[in-house]
Amino acid sequence: MTDEILMVGFGPVGRATVALLVAQGRRVRLAQRTRPADLPDAVAFTACDVLDPASVRDAVAGAAQVAVAVGFAYTGEVWERCWPLAMQNLLDACAAHGARLLFFDNLYMYGPQRAALVETMPLTDYGRKPAARARITRMWQRDARVRVVALRAPDFYGPGVTLSHLGETGLMAIARGKAATFVFNPDQPHDYAYVPDIGRAMVTLLDAGDDAYGRAWHMPCAPTRTSREILALGAASMGVRLRLRSIPPLVMRGLALVVPFLRELREMQFQWDRPYHVDAHDWTARFWSDVTPFEQGVAETMRAFQD
């Protein structure tokens, strides 16, 4: 039986997962539309478009496990159209080849909540993007053909992570001597996951028994802090005082009328106008809890951005 792992997607999470698998001497292959210039020599490559069912089926052939960490343009229209198609293609391909499926997910499907997020919360019909994530969750939950597990994480940060609230306009800006910009309230407590920790969690689930599948797991995070506190750690590592700009809610509401990307972000304001906590007790009870402290993770991220 093959022991090959197919990694679909080579963004920050895909890279962290592949790096750990390669370091362990595992047999891993990458599938996405184009071959990355920095793909390690030890990693095979297959061209694949997750929106093309034949392409996905061909890519999955020969793999025992499929780990998926892909993204689409951040618009409700694209998510409603593309995510169900991609999920169906992945489920069909894994069913055809008898492969297990590990899906890296976010936490949008819970919608607005006041309590800490737990895996058993009901799926939402709120908004376009949260409802799209809820829809694809129902798809894999109801598909008895495939052993599926989801790793759900909040906003993340780390080396190479630019498309993040702590990324290009946050820690990267500070590393380049600029003021940080934060779209929402930077003083709300908010959980963040560190990308190398996510990669470790992905490999943990690839190595887990079938009894860990058929459900979602929440990614453990360092003790909750505010975004301002995390950005201040980045500034302190540079020996400077934090300079931070944020957008007041009334200004955000007005800008969202004319700036499409801000309109898409405003749909997710419920994650930022209240404390946002992720309950990962299930994970820490079964696997591990020694996540990277913010002091270490931010320092490593700042060094990477300086390089």
Image (cartoon, rainbow, N blue to C red):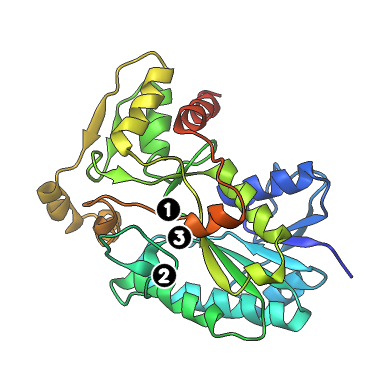
As drawn, the label of residue 243 is: none
Residue placed most toward the observer, 181 or 119: 119
Residue that mark 2 sits on:
78
Residue pictured at 43% horizontal, 31% vertical: 172
Q: Residue furthest front?
A: 285
Q: Which residue type does callout 2 highlight?
A: Val
As drawn, the label of residue 106 is: 3
- Residues under labels 3 and 2: Cα distance? 16 Å
Residue placed most toward the observer, 260 or 201: 201
Q: Position of residue 108 (x, y in %)?
A: 38, 64
Q: Nearer the viewer, mark 2 or mark 1?
A: 1
- Callout 2: 10 Å neighbours few (<14), some, many (20+)? some
Residue placed most toward the observer, 273 or 215: 215
**If you read the primary sequence from the N terminus, does the residue marked by circle 2 or circle 1 appear first?**
2
- Residues under labels 2 and 1: Cα distance? 21 Å
Q: Nearer the viewer, mark 3 or mark 2?
A: 3
**If you read the primary sequence from the N terminus, does the residue marked by circle 3 or circle 1 appear first?**
3
Residue that mark 1 sits on:
154
Establish if 238 lies above or below 263: above
Q: Regarding mark 3 in the picture, which secondary structure is present there?
A: loop
- Residues under labels 3 and 1: Cα distance? 6 Å
